[in-house]
Amino acid sequence: MCISFVHISSDPCSKYKLIVLSNRDEVFERPALSAAWRQGILGGVDVQAGGTWLGVSEDGRVGILLSITQPEGTKNPKAPSRGDMPYDYLKQCNSANEFLNSLKTRADKYNGFQFLCLERNEKDTYEMSSLTNLFVDKHFFLTPGTHVISNSPIDKPLQKTIHGKRLFEDVVPQVQQASSADEVIEILLKVANDQRRCMPDDQLVKQVGRASPLFNDLVAPLSAIFVRFPSNFRYGTRTHTVFVVDQQNNATFFEKRIEQPTEDIENAAWKCEKFTFKLSNKDHVKHEITSNC
């Protein structure tokens, strides 16, 4: 389970043209590398499969991968890794529309996914498109505004997606008025850490595939933005990512992740890293700062 929050502003008077917040939920022991620039792409790495869940290019394009929750017995263990999608999108020169049209021709080979593409248009504002391959087979173009996407098709939102959109809409004005990137991060992390369980959720139960009372007890943790199970279940939210771009194309990328999973996950140490850079038009980053917190 993962969830992404995206705000695209078409108002040239707003401070930020793009605001992205994302939670990654995964098995705690699954190895991953922290965010860094690797071959012109900024993001973390899933060591086991070699891909990523969220990446940013030097010119500010963003690729976000979300799984579509599906019954365990319906997954293909031999399916190709979905984590290659962000890399494939960010390394090529085609538009998001061209990339998604190409991806659609082979989408049925993958387990359930939703892939989000963000890119700047000729007006230097952002556009977002997505492709989903499970429950619906659709290529969506999303208009400027506020969008929250999780592990269901965009037009079949989970209850936590609906709840998250309300939270996100409430804080976007605060983000636009924030005096610093650090303040922006602080505001957005409050949304990322919301633990309200949004049950009942018929869509979630439908996608998981079972609905017994005991199973609902197990599903309930997945209905929160910040996912936490009892300590004996080693899965949950382990990475937060923030990416914002202002009207002058100054970008800030922030990652907060569990550095070393411990038996007591509630007291595990988290590591923060922040990158700032100027979006390039072609093949180089004009400025970059990296800091740990």
Image (cartoon, rainbow, N blue to C red):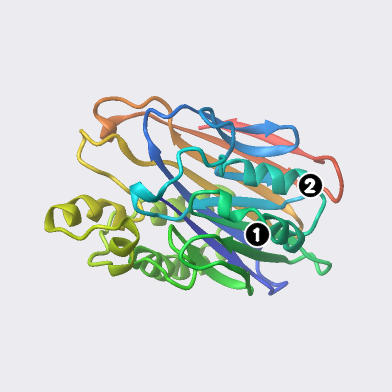
Q: Is residue 205 left or right of residue 145?
A: left
Say which quarter of the image contains residue 266.
top left
Could you say where residue 82 lies in the image, as x and y percent from the top left?
56, 44
Q: Which amino acid, by three-letter code, is at mark 1?
A: Lys
* Name of the residue lying farthest toward the left: 213
Q: Residues within 10 Å of mark 1 (few under 14, many from 20)?
A: some
Question: What's the CA distance linking mark 2 and mark 1?
Answer: 16 Å
Res 154 visible: yes
Res 179 visible: no
Could you say where residue 187 lies in the image, as x and y percent from the top left?
46, 55
First in sequence: mark 2 vs mark 1? 2
Q: Residue 92: which disc?
A: 2
Could you say where residue 227 lies in the image, as x and y percent from the top left?
32, 48
Could you say where residue 231 lies in the image, as x and y percent from the top left?
21, 35
Q: Nearer the viewer, residue 166 or 135?
A: 135
Q: Residue 174: which disc?
A: none
Q: Could you tell me which secondary element the residue under label 2 belongs to?
A: loop
Q: Residue at x 84, y 67 (%)?
A: 122
Q: Which amino acid, by three-letter code, is at mark 2?
A: Gln
* Name of the residue lying farthest toward the right: 282
Q: Residue 104: which disc?
A: 1
Q: Residues within 10 Å of mark 2 (few under 14, many from 20)?
A: few
